[in-house]
Image (cartoon, helix red, strand yellow):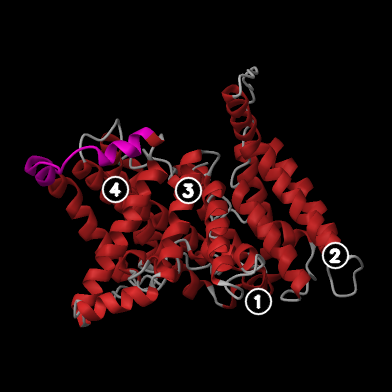
Amino acid sequence: MGLLTFAFFSFFAAVCLAYWAVPARWRSWLLLGASLAFYAIWNAGLLALLVGTTVINHLLLRRLRPDGSHRLAVLRLGIVIQCALLFTFKYFAFFVDSAAAVFALSGIHTEPLVLQLVVPLGLSYYCLRAIALLADTYRGQYDGKLSLPEHALYLLFFPSVTAGPIDRPRQFLDQLHTNGGCGWRTAIPRGADLLFVGLLKKAVIANGLAPVVDGLFAGAFTSTGAAALAAVTYAFYIYADFSGYTDIARGVAGCLGIELTVNFRRPYAARSTSEFWQRWHMSLSTWLRDYVFLPLGGAFRSPLRAYANLVITMLIAGLWHGASFMFVLWGLYIGLLLVAHRALQPSLRKLRRAARLRGWTKRVVETGLTFSLISAGWLLFRGTNLGQTASAFRGGMANLADCADFARQVVPYGIALFGLDLVIGDGEATLLRGTRLPWWTKPILVAVGVYAFLILGTDTQSFVYAQF
């Protein structure tokens, strides 16, 4: 059941009506039942697997409380279980095939592995949430005193199970105890705002750019200029697609009185690669910082150790996105950009002084350079193979006809995306709440808009991050 389908929005409307109709003490149970039903409609067998894993995780969690014994061993066991689950479904065939390729270089030939496993929906996000809950309980940042149903709801909450955001345990679970902290007259209009903005991003901008992106990446790039056009187009596309999904998920949860983590904060306005990762997929960035980078030693030891930790963290981030060498190379590229930004700070300051960059000129130059470097990385992220990416550097600039066609097809979407960024601000949309319409008309407008988008056939493209 995709997020842009009649089935999902009919399901959500029924859940929302029931949620605000039942007594507060039953609402968590209702959300759990809805989440399990949502997952079972997709694949009941894999739901049983994740429920079984959740039970094991819950038993381990009880041993991680301050009065538990062998807490470090229990934590390690829990992390190993989650990593084993990820490895089995997402990476086992990849590593076996990679090992076979290495053996082939040595003259040892093996039969190719034929293994078709259906990856559980949202498995990567499920595992990251499970590890966060174990680690926070071990560290004393969460007391771990939650029931099994609450534990399952945190891991399988239906608006965010497909592609995040990755909420922290305390932030999400505390809201269950307060039932969102607001009434339906506040929650529904606030959630409807985010839902409407997310639909505009996905159904209008991302789906409009998708054919252009597919055409640009259809084969090897004929020039460096063509590759640059592809990179910029894909930068707009993936941001509209993924932030659109996040806004829809946050809007759906918001209508239920649950505030999910803000995942984007105008990332293409960043003035450095480090700042970009503080604005892009923020729930994943902070997860990697707290549960990978800092446990590795962070930046508190020697500079070389800090650089190595950055690269290792981003390699893990790349591999997390999928079993492909292109994702690994993308992670390596981003890691090296972060190392370069940290290592070259003194030189960059001297360069800015020498170039006399100040005020808005400095901001434009830094933002433009950061956007260019990040967009170049998207060639690796979206590229099908290294040969396609390498072809980007073999030719010359794009001709004027290509540039004019690019401007005609892509620039309007970029302007619209920039405008929506201004509307949504720092995570709260005010598109509908900024009007003087009665409160009860706004959810109706959103509902009409949702079904209009669906009737017009806008659900032609799946969400990019749903595959991760």
Residue 94 in the image: x percent, y percent? 60, 33
Query: Which element is circle 4 on?
Result: helix
Which numbered circle lies on residue 178? 1
| The magenta stretch spans residue 399 | yes
Which residue is denoted by mark 4 in the rendering? 231
Left or right: 104 in relation to 26: left
User: Which residue is pictured at 59% across the width and 29% down the height?
Assistant: 102
Q: Earlier in the sequence, mark 4 or mark 1?
A: 1
Between marks 3 and 4, how big is the CA–CA gap?
A: 18 Å
At label 4, the amino acid type is: Ala
Q: Is residue 431 visible?
A: no
User: Which residue is pictured at 41% across the width and 72% down the height?
Assistant: 428
Which residue is denoted by mark 2 in the rendering? 62
Residue 463 in the image: x percent, y percent? 43, 45
User: Which residue is pictured at 13% across the width and 47% down the height?
Assistant: 408
Which residue is denoted by mark 3 in the rendering? 465
| The magenta stretch spans residue 336 | no
Q: How many marks?
A: 4
